[in-house]
Image (spheres, rainbow, N blue to C red):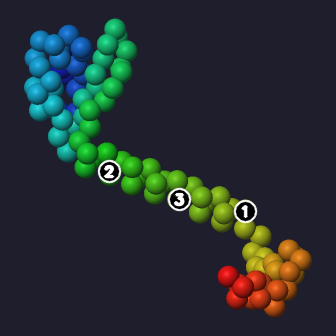
């Protein structure tokens, strides 16, 4: 049976059969989500699409922050010019410009 009206709620497959899916969907709003349980195991979650989008954006923000923090903590401060990279790879600017004009 469902918990209180505020916060995540839990419904079993028996609740869905008894109450109907529309009643379960009514419990989902922009702030609350619903767990569906079968045999004492959570098998699904119903979440408002706007809330899911916010969570996915936050997840991406956290990932980006972790990448930036990692780069900052491992940055030696050394910067390399494009010409140095080209030379290290065994090319010259003229060769790259010539191959670009061939396309």
Q: Nearer the viewer, residue 70 or 24?
A: 24
Q: Which residue is mark 2?
A: 53
**Residue pictured at 32% horizontal, 50% vertical:** 53
Question: How many discs mark residues in the rendered view?
Answer: 3
**Residue pictured at 26% horizontal, 32% vertical:** 46
Extreme residue in the front direction: 102
In the image: residue 68, left or right of residue 31: right
Residue 34 at least partly seen:
yes
Quarter of the image with the C terminus in it: bottom right
Alpha-carbon span between mark 2 and mark 3: 18 Å
For disc 3, the neighbor class at 10 Å (few under 14, some 14 to 19, many from 20) is: few
**Residue pictured at 36% horizontal, 48% vertical:** 55
In the image: residue 70, left or right of residue 84: left
Q: Disc 1 or disc 2, which is closer to the eye?
A: 2
Q: Which residue is mark 1?
A: 74
Q: Nearer the viewer, residue 101 or 31?
A: 101
Q: Nearer the viewer, residue 5 or 100?
A: 100
For disc 1, the neighbor class at 10 Å (few under 14, some 14 to 19, many from 20) is: few
Q: Which residue is mark 3?
A: 65
Extreme residue in the bottom direction: 94
Q: Are marks 3 and 1 in contact (CB under 8 Å)?
A: no
Dot 2 falls on a residue whose secondary structure is helix
Q: Is residue 55 above or below residue 34?
A: below
Label located before the other in sequence (1 or 2):
2
Image coordinates of residue 96 in percent, x first then y, are 77, 84
Dot 3 falls on a residue whose secondary structure is helix
Image coordinates of residue 63 in percent, x first then y, are 52, 53
Alpha-carbon span between mark 1 and mark 2: 32 Å
Q: Is residue 60 above or below residue 46?
A: below
Residue 43 image label = none
For disc 2, the neighbor class at 10 Å (few under 14, some 14 to 19, many from 20) is: few
């Amino acid at each position: 049976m469902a918990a209180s009206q505020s916060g995540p709620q839990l419904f079993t497959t028996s609740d869905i059969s008894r109450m109907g899916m529309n009643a379960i969907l009514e419990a989902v709003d922009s702030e609350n989500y619903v767990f569906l349980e079968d045999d004492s195991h959570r098998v699904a979650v119903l979440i408002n699409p706007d809330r899911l989008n916010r969570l996915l954006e936050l997840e991406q923000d956290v990932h980006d922050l972790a990448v930036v923090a990692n780069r900052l903590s491992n940055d030696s401060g050394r910067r390399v010019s494009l010409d140095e990279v080209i030379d290290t790879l065994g090319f010259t600017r003229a060769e790259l410009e010539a191959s670009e004009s061939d396309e």
